[in-house]
Image (cartoon, rainbow, N blue to C red):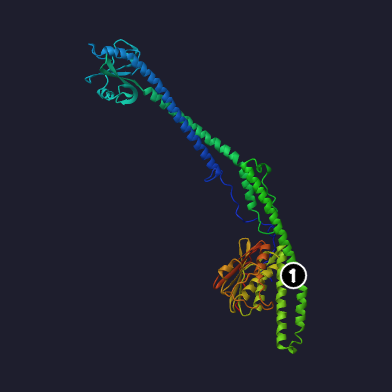
Amino acid sequence: MSYPATVQPGAGPPANPPRTSEVVPRPDPFGRHTLGRQLVVRVTALVALAALLITTATALATRQVLMSQLDRQLDAVTARLRDPVDNYLGSERGPNSGLLRPGQPIGTLAVIYDTDGNAESGRLTERAAAGQRGADVPTLPEAAVSRLAGVPTDGSKSSITLSELGHYRVVGFRIFSGATTVGTVVVGVPLNQVDETVLDLVGLAALFSLLVIGGTIFAARSLVVRSLRPLNRVAATAQQVSRLQLDRGEVALAVRVPPEDANPASEVGQVGQALNHMLNNVEEALAARQASETKVRQFVADASHELRNPLAAIRGYAELTRRDREQLPTDAAYAMSRVESEASRMSHLVEDMLLLARLDSGPDLDLQPCDLSEIVINAVSDARAAGPDHAWQLTLPQYPVIAYGDQHRLQQVMANLLANARTHTPPRTQVHTVVSVSGADAVVTVTDNGPGIPPEMSNRVFERFARGDASRMRTPDAGTGGSTGLGLAIVAAVVDAHHGSVAVSSQPGHTQFTVRLPLAQFAPASPAGRGPDMLAPH
């Protein structure tokens, strides 16, 4: 077949194309839901909780110690006040003249209540506490005096807050004259230094806790990354195995977890060891499967080869009876014609089984650039001759489509696709074949407007001996005695051996088979040199 432009074949695709399955990306070690992130968060939370507990316990213990010291100080102040108070009540001296003497803590207060509820109070200032001359002891505010009146006088210590004065530790006791109570005294020392000390301690502890938590996050990330390295290596091995093609053929599982990551002394080592044991078992199972498949293929190939000669003899003897078939009884003549027809069909079946066995054991293809357009034209012409009751159409591009493949096997692919459309569709069905180019692929589609393929059969049409039901009517295949059920299986096997793909889509009134094959070279010719080739409906 000639074209307006000369096409020089180019180099073909690689013999072993890479697998197109998706490669699993390596996850972020601290991404969401990862073990590394969970470990860092949990360790940090544990450290933060420990820091909080330690800070709280330290603050409480420190406050308790300071309060004990303050209580001893309050006892000392109370002891120093008892004698002056006893002498003070009922005397003629003025208020505060001898109640609070120098040497007491700054801010120490005292309030004396007589039996009538009258109060005299005082509070040491810095000068009064130091014993400086002329230092006054100021009277307490009325609100503070009223508040202190409610302090128990049984000698128990308590903490109260006085307006304008702050937080105090106070104690109250009665004053007796003989056995008669002549008044009560409330003495207090300020708690401000204790509160400030505890507050400073809590602030420093919080600061140190934040620093510790920050350091824990950094250290935990480093430790987690280092600790998870063996697990990541085991996961990488598992991902590498998951990308291997294990569905068919001879498989070599050379990937294993390194010995240092398969030490059962650690949890990760136990996982690595279990993975290695699993890979050993899988490798043995795959080897056994491959050996079984090899035996089956060899048996099918040997049986098919051995059946060819007896079938040829049966066909030959059946054809010899044609000379005298008119002299045979009607039943005998019909029986011999059926023997000849079925022998022919079995011969085709044996040839198909032998071809599939050879393809399974390793396709021996003569791969070279070939004119796919010419192959399709010849196949459609043969189909028109074999099925004149169908309407055959062909659409070709304006340039030659050079595919990389075995011309004889590609001719068989097209013949099987067109025979499938002819055999499983009723007369007057339109079958349209289109050759086109899509990217780096040559694309051939065979479309018919027959009854379609049932949905439950769409996923099994390329299986061996897959047969549809009455939705796609089967008619005897001229010259073969009917379909063998292996035509589309041969199509799938041959196309796969060419590193191509075949797919089907079907619904009532529209069934389309799509074959994609690698291009050897795509060289457009001048549009004026040739228009689309069309075979008009016949």
- Pointer 1: what residue? 304
Q: Residue at x 27, y 20 (%)?
A: 140
Q: Is residue 436 above or below residue 69?
A: below
- State which quarter of the image contains the C terminus: bottom right
Q: Nearer the viewer, residue 484 or 73?
A: 73
Query: Measured from the top left, where is residue 7 in percent x and y?
Result: 68, 65
Q: Is residue 218 above or below residue 397?
A: above
Query: Measured from the top left, where is residue 212 in percent x and y?
Result: 50, 32
Q: Nearer the viewer, residue 87 or 430?
A: 87
Q: Amino acid at mark 1?
A: Ser
Query: Measured from the top left, where is residue 197 in percent x and y?
Result: 41, 24
Does residue 354 appear in this view? yes
Q: Is residue 91 above or below residue 254?
A: above
Q: Residue at x 59, y 47 (%)?
A: 26
- Looking at the rendered structure, the number of numbered marks drawn on it comes to 1
**Quadrant of residue 410 within the rendered picture:** bottom right
Q: Nearer the viewer, residue 356 or 128?
A: 128
In the image: residue 328, left or right of residue 162: right
Q: Nearer the viewer, residue 461 or 120?
A: 120
The outermost residue toward the bottom is: 327
Query: Measured from the top left, where is residue 204 in percent x and y?
Result: 45, 28
Does residue 366 appear in this view? no
The outermost residue toward the front is: 179
